[in-house]
Image: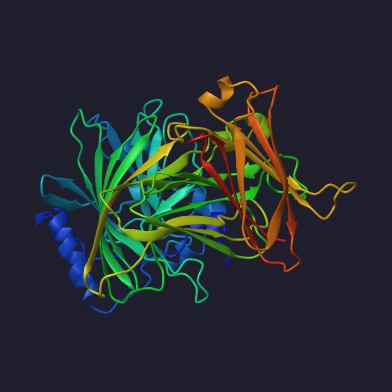
Amino acid sequence: MKFSRNLLLLACLGAACMQARADDVFDFEVLRFQAKMLAAKPFVQSPVSVPEPLLKLNYDQYRDIRFKPSESLWRRERLPFELQFFHPGFTFDRPVHIHTLQGKSAEPVPFSSSLFDYGINRVPSVPSTTGFAGLRILYALNKPGDELGSFLGASYFRFLCQRAIYGLSARGLALNTGEQGGEEFPVFREFWVERPSPDSKTLNVYALLDGPSVAGAYRFQITPGADTVIQIHEVLYCRRNPAVLGVAPLTSMFWHGKNTNQSFDDFRPEVHDSDGLMMFTGAEEWLWRPLSNPNATRVASFSDQNPKGFGLIQRERRFENYQDLEADYHMRPSAWVEPVGLWGGGSVRLVELHAPDESYDNITAFWVPESLPAAGEPIELTYKLHWFLDQIHPPAGYVVATRHGRTATQESDLERFFIDFDGSYLGKQGPDPQIEPVVTVGPGATLANSTIQKNPFNGTWRVAFAIRPDGTGKPVELRCYLRKQPHALTETWSYLWQP
């Protein structure tokens, strides 16, 4: 199961929905009722409604169709947020319908070819009722006219904080991700965007989701800044309960990093949009799971009760560790899911796929509820989704590097791991015999030795330990943190070593 990054956001668009009249009354309760009624009926995939010549455009031809900046919605009114739209075509064969809201009055945004510059393309006329592929939101994030975020393809969306460039994505829902039978991609089939006031700091977007298994109502309250925060409220109705219902899914790319001990014939030391899964459990334990690029699909579940947060994090922020003047991986945002209210029991699930290169989104993380209500009963929850560079991290020490390998000349049967910890408290401490590593080795290996050392060159603390595999070939779960009795000084490093 592989996802091409070039196609991931450009695939699986769903059916276009009912078009609203200008006098339609709309609010979230109306949207919720629409989702409930939709789920009470069998799923119907709408026919392809885009002229065939547009569907035959290749990637470069499609990218040559650009929205005219002067036509941005609300630009003439000088409102703080503006909207632009993506043209249907290429893989976008089933457009979405977009409406604006003023009070409770909804008005459709008609498609018009006058909104676009077609470059060298010659395309047929498109009816005004066709709809768009998606929408883009502009805001003066760093300077006027900056792109803040977009909704494009299936239920995918991605946003920026100040100083960041695009990296990982989020989704409305993940269904059966990592399962043997294949993944289902529900789609946002219709959007409503609330007209902002001249002094608005937040933009409200509503969306109707639909797919073979689930229909749902979504409200996005988007507040941009150094930490761009989207408060998401969703109500889901299942036509049938999926094997895995993934809430608040994040999707990213990890090709290689410090913990990769194989050569990819690449000049850059690291290539990834995210380098770890960070979790803050209901028991108030911080966990760090370095990401990997496995040879085969790998799924890990972290059981929890009322989680306080989880996210895919780009922790390495130094350009020198990427050496890429075009991709700027050191400026890719992290994304953090902060539940609002109690989510009950369940697990954070991490799915890692093999990526042959950096064009594949091969990492997905999401929350899986322990149980679901009967099909047709609502699943309702709220969370804040943060897009940031460095604002969220454990209050104590944290992992800054993971490395592992073998020594050819001494005890070559041992697998060696080196974990570097940093943090404000640790950085101020000199060598201290009371600071000790706590290393746990699961079935499949035993701990051979461990040491801890203050790094005199950069102030971090390095734990070095070695394990002796038992020869069964079982994957081995490893954990490590620093302690100064009776206190834990760091988050817990969690790792799955595959012989």
The percent coordinates of residue 66 (x first, y second) are 44, 45
Name the side, left or right, on which 384 lies relative to 36: right
For residue 363, above or below residue 279: below
Residue 249 drawn at (x, y percent)? 42, 55
Residue that lies at the very extreme toward the right in this rendered image: 409
Which residue: 42% across, 59% down?
347
Q: Position of residue 476 (x, y in %)?
A: 64, 59
Q: 415 left or right of 291?
A: right
Q: Is residue 483 left or right of residue 286?
A: right
Image quadrant assignment for residue 451: top right
Is any part of residue 126 visible from this angle? no
Question: How many labels, in total?
Answer: 0
Q: Residue at x 50, y 73 (%)?
A: 182
Q: State whether residue 340 is above or below residue 249.
A: above
Where in the figure is residue 320, as x and y percent of width and height? 67, 30
Q: Quadrant of residue 195?
A: top left
Q: Is residue 188 above or below residue 222?
A: below
Taking the spot 57% from the left edge, 57% from the top edge, the residue there is: 362
Quarter of the image where one finds residue 204:
top left
230 or 258, which lies in front?
258
Foreground of the two, 281 or 276: 281
Indicate the colouring scheme.
Answer: rainbow
Residue at 25% over, 49% down: 341
Q: Is residue 340 visible?
A: yes
Q: Nearer the viewer, residue 133 or 9?
A: 9
**In the rendered view of the protein, which quadrant contains the N terminus?**
bottom right
Quadrant in which the C terminus appears? bottom right
**Left or right side of 210 for 353:** right
**Which residue in the rendered view is the most extreme toward the bottom?**
42
- Front in this rendered view, residue 339 or 463: 463
